[in-house]
Image (cartoon, rainbow, N blue to C red):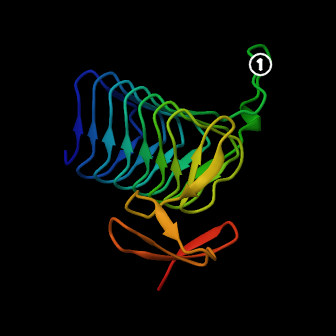
Amino acid sequence: MTYFVHESAYVDDDVTIGEGTRIWHFSHMLSKSTIGENCRIGQNVMIGPNVSVGDGCKIQNNVSVYEGVTLEDYVFCGPSMVFTNVLNPRSEIPRMDELRPTLVRRGATLGANCTVMCGITVGEYAFVGAGAVVLEDVPDYALVVGVPGRISGWVCSCGHRIEFDEEGGAGSCRECGREYRKAGAIVEAAR
């Protein structure tokens, strides 16, 4: 075995786990889920059926990644953050045929105790702050905070703020020096 599963964790028979991944205490990986290489799955994490988790993801304690959620490579899910998968759940009305897919793109960070409503796409390297409630798509590199979540700035792929010039077209990260271009709500790395 090229991955580690703590003895208290439970992995269904038809789960695929990549090399170097570590799954910790009291976690459950459900049927037909796929977990990439070099992931860190914290304590009391549930990966739902048919879920795809990319390479290098870190899912902290007490997170449930429900069916319908896809995490691309290098996504960070902070402690106790929440995904949903049905828009209007009722206990007495079965609605599993109404799942709304949620996509978290490469390198995004979802802060502790934030909530991501179903049907949302969180863009590449976006950063959702602790406790935020995400009700709409998040653009690449956006920093989203508050309830409801609102864009309050832009972050570099290294996780630090991007400072844009007065016109807002060119910007850079003071921490690592990467350069970016901004046009409205679209930010992309400069080539």
Task: Answer left or right for 53 relative to 176.
Answer: right
The image shows residue 157 at horizontal and vertical percentages of 42, 64
The residue positioned 28% from the left and 24% from the top of the image is 25
Instruction: Give the x, y percent position of residue 80.
Output: 46, 28
Amino acid under disc 1: Arg
Task: Out of 191 and 40, give the one closest to the viewer.
Answer: 191
Q: Position of residue 147 (x, y in %)?
A: 66, 34
Q: Position of residue 9 (x, y in %)?
A: 31, 25
Q: Secondary structure at mark 1?
A: loop
Q: Quadrant of residue 6?
A: top left
Give the answer, above or below, for where 88 lies relative to 177.
above
Q: Residue at x 68, y 52 (%)?
A: 137
Q: Is residue 38 above or below residue 11?
A: below
- Residue at 57% x, 63% y is 140
> Of residues 75 and 27, which is closer to you in this image?
75
Question: Which image quadrant: the N terminus?
Answer: top left
Q: Which residue is mark 1?
A: 90
Residue at 45% over, 59% down = 161
Image height of 48 relative to 168, above or below: above
- Image quadrant where residue 14 sits: top left
Which of the 4 image quarters holds residue 7? top left
Q: In this rendered view, identify the residue nearer to me: 121 or 89.
A: 121
Query: Is residue 51 toward the left or the right of residue 9 in the image?
Result: right
Neighbourhood count class around disc 1 (C-alpha, 10 Å): few under 14, some 14–19, many 20 upward = few
